[in-house]
Image: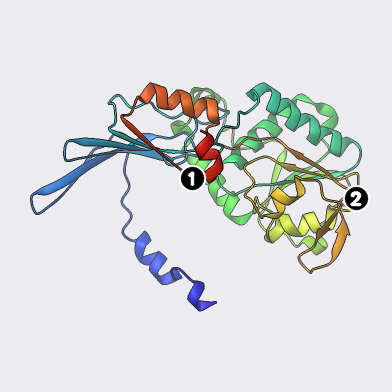
Amino acid sequence: KPEDVLYTASELNNCLQKVEVLDYHTSITLQEEGRGLSFYALNAGHVLGACMYVIQFGGRNILYTGDYSMEDDRHLMAAEIPKQQPDLLIAESTYGVQVHASRAEREARFTGTVERIVTRGGRCLIPVFALGRAQELLLILDEYWQANPHLHDIPIWYASKLASRALRVYQTYANMMNARIRQQMDIGNPFEFSFIRNLKSIDVNNFDDSGPSVVFASPGMLQSGVSRQLFDRWASNPNNGVMIAGYAVEHTLAKEIMLQPKEVVTLEGRRQPLNCLVDYVSFSAHVDFVQNRSFIQQVAPKHVVLVHGQKDEMGRF
């Protein structure tokens, strides 16, 4: 409905024209009528280029984390710890008081589940957003395929126009990533995968899925698009599987199927049985409770405001 539109494409384009590129640790000062504020960006570790901001004005310091991660993963560095104690910390609390399993446990469960699905002849759908965890999961799975020759003939597809453009950015700015990626750059670009093929476009109705395969497809919440079309097509087959590998928002299909309902409704409104395997392994690039608490303790702010979380979870935190 027109009245529900918050902004138009034209207004968005006008905003993009005003964007200015800023390097980490570069201080910017804005002045007006003798008053002003300054700010600089720190690495937030959430996705490539993600920032947290230190804002200084009136003798006060505010640290706004935005989305951040304290995990040094396959390709990104963990968020920085600011050197100056803030008067106010505004921190995300996406996971509230939840605690993630260890990195090794999550990777083993992820790769093991994908292998189990495809070696029994099934199709494995991994719904992802174009930017962020998709690149991390691609690195993990490509490395796992390299180490397991019996999987080499099973294709891994990456189906997203936006994701392929995002991947080119990752290939270009690999020097901004962690030491592991920079060392691999001496041999070759780690984002030029050996076993993953890009699908610039996909017609689900004509997609050849007669054999086992793995498909990364967006969007991550399974609400529409290629991931939803493939899910509708594969959900009733018990040999198939869906791996939810990031945060699932309430009232989305991704969250709904994690509760293992007996039936699901397709995009066309038809009910069908949910017979495929559904598994969840969190590779979400948000801090869990332990990481968030540790960061707050290290930063030692005078005041804390929690945002980006469910009300009850923030209250328990």
Q: Is residue 11 left or right of residue 222?
A: left
Q: State the image coordinates of residue 296 (x, y, percent, origin top left).
A: 41, 27
Q: Is residue 276 left or right of residue 177?
A: right
Q: Is residue 25 above or below residue 130?
A: above
- Return the residue nearer the eye: 121 or 128: 128
Q: Quadrant of residue 107?
A: top right
- Return the residue nearer the eye: 125 or 297: 297
Residue 70 visible in the displayed image: no
- Return the residue nearer the eye: 61 or 198: 61
The amino acid marked with disc number 1 is: His
Residue 156 visible in the displayed image: yes
The residue sitting at 78% across, 61% down in the picture is 204
Q: Is residue 196 left or right of residue 275?
A: left
Q: Quadrant of residue 15?
A: bottom left
The residue sitting at 8% across, 49% down in the picture is 34
Q: Secondary structure at mark 1?
A: loop
Does the residue at mark 2 contact the one at mark 1 (Cβ under 8 Å)? no
The amino acid marked with disc number 2 is: Asn
Number of the label disc, if any, that sits on residue 264: none
The residue sitting at 19% across, 44% down in the picture is 37
Number of the label disc, if any, that sits on residue 237: 2
Q: State the image coordinates of residue 43 (x, y, percent, origin top left).
A: 40, 33
Q: State the image coordinates of residue 26 (x, y, percent, origin top left).
A: 26, 37
Quarter of the figure with the N terminus? bottom right
Q: Give the residue at mark 1.
A: 308
Q: State the image coordinates of residue 304 (x, y, percent, origin top left).
A: 37, 35
